[in-house]
Amino acid sequence: MLSLKDILAMSSPMRLATIALLLAQPGVSQTYTDCNPLQSSNCPPDAALGQSIGVDFANGQSDQFSATGNPTYDSNGVSLSVAQQGDAPTLISDWYIMFGRVEITMKSAPGKGIVSSVVLQSNDLDEIDWEWVGTATQQVQSNYFGKGQTGSYNRAALHDAPDCQNTWHKYTIDWTSDEIVWQIDGTTVRALKAEDSLGPYPQTPMQVKFGIWAGGDPSNPQGTIDWAGGVTDYTAGPYTMLVDSISVTDYSTGSEYTWGDQSGTWSSIRSKGGEVNGNIGADTIASGNAPAVTTAAAGSNVEPYSGTHASCSTCSSPGIGGWTVSASSEPSVTNTDYPGLPSGWTVSSSGKVIPPSAAPVIDVPFRLVCLVAGSLASGFVLRLGL
């Protein structure tokens, strides 16, 4: 088996071919933003919602969302199901909001290892979440991240959601420059003031995403499987998340949002044909007397959703379906420049080959790196007749 030293000792063409092959593998999952405005000044504008909309999925597919996987529609709304390994149907908004309110009426999916998620996410990996684990029939988790930084995984909180797999509940996220408010059926269960944020406060244009995935897939890291409630038994499925309707209000106006600089602050965001906070008004939810919440600490059984956010040094690899979590006891990652790697490429302390920040971030088990590199090297040797 080849070591990292062996790979770095390869000739430049062979080494680059090895890395290119890794990037091209369909089974190698990637987590990245198409263009992170903190790393590039040439990112395209974000299409703005700029208004309020309501979608009743009982009426069928909506032109406001793009679907991945195979969601189905009937009188109950949209069904997102995991029936076999690799299933992870998701609906993603075709627009962004710059502060706003999202209300979704839904039933979470049952099942060991099954995770239902509703996520607001920006191009620079600001994020606000609701998450349901299939073995927790009376509970939902809230979470948030700024600029993809997980910190010490201490931002999640647990909330009562009675019989959430069989009862329709309305889950709300109200997001302004001052605070985030989470509500269940109109009752505030959590409020976060911007000044109390652990790490950067989410404050850049966000898409709305919701879907289901198998955190308990056997190919996932053990920490992911444990957090999701155990190994998923696909033969006992399908496991279905139901969404009746969603309403979204953009608290800003205009047709698109652009970044005035790379500060990542809300005041740097520009609106074409409108105004940031131009639609904020009396319907904004005030936190009032928000109840105290139990925030997860390192070592607890509450894990953050990390298919889209990352530590400040590297993005986490998604598991089957594209969304995954990382164990709260995961050590911090440091990257090292090695002689012989292409310019800008590094290797993390866990053996991850990390491309430049502008490229998709690959989280590949080092065994796979060695295997592919070894196979490729053998092919070169045979071809050369050595």
Image (tube, helix red, strand yellow):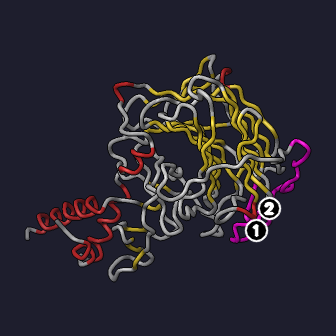
**Magenta span includes 272:** yes
Seen at 54% across and 29% down, the residue is 241
Is the residue 239 above or below the residue 325 in the image? above
Residue 13 image position (x, y, % from top left): 29, 73
Q: Furthest residue to the left?
A: 386
Give me the disc on residue 309: none
Q: Which residue is mark 1?
A: 260
**Camera sees residue 200:** yes
> Bounds of the magenta span?
257-283
User: Disc 2 or 1, which lies upstream in sequence?
Assistant: 1
Q: Nearer the viewer, residue 275 or 116?
A: 116
Of residues 103 and 338, the one nearer the viewer is 103
Give above or below for 125 relative to 95.
below
Residue sitting nearer the eye, 227 or 367: 227
In the rendered image, the residue lying farthest to the top is: 75
Q: Which residue is mark 2?
A: 270
Q: Residue at x 69, y 67 (%)?
A: 264
Q: Secondary structure at mark 1?
A: loop
Up-down: is 355 above or below 179? Answer: below
Label 2 crowd (10 A; few <14 / some 14-19 / many >=20)? some
Looking at the image, residue 212 sits to the left or right of residue 255; the answer is left
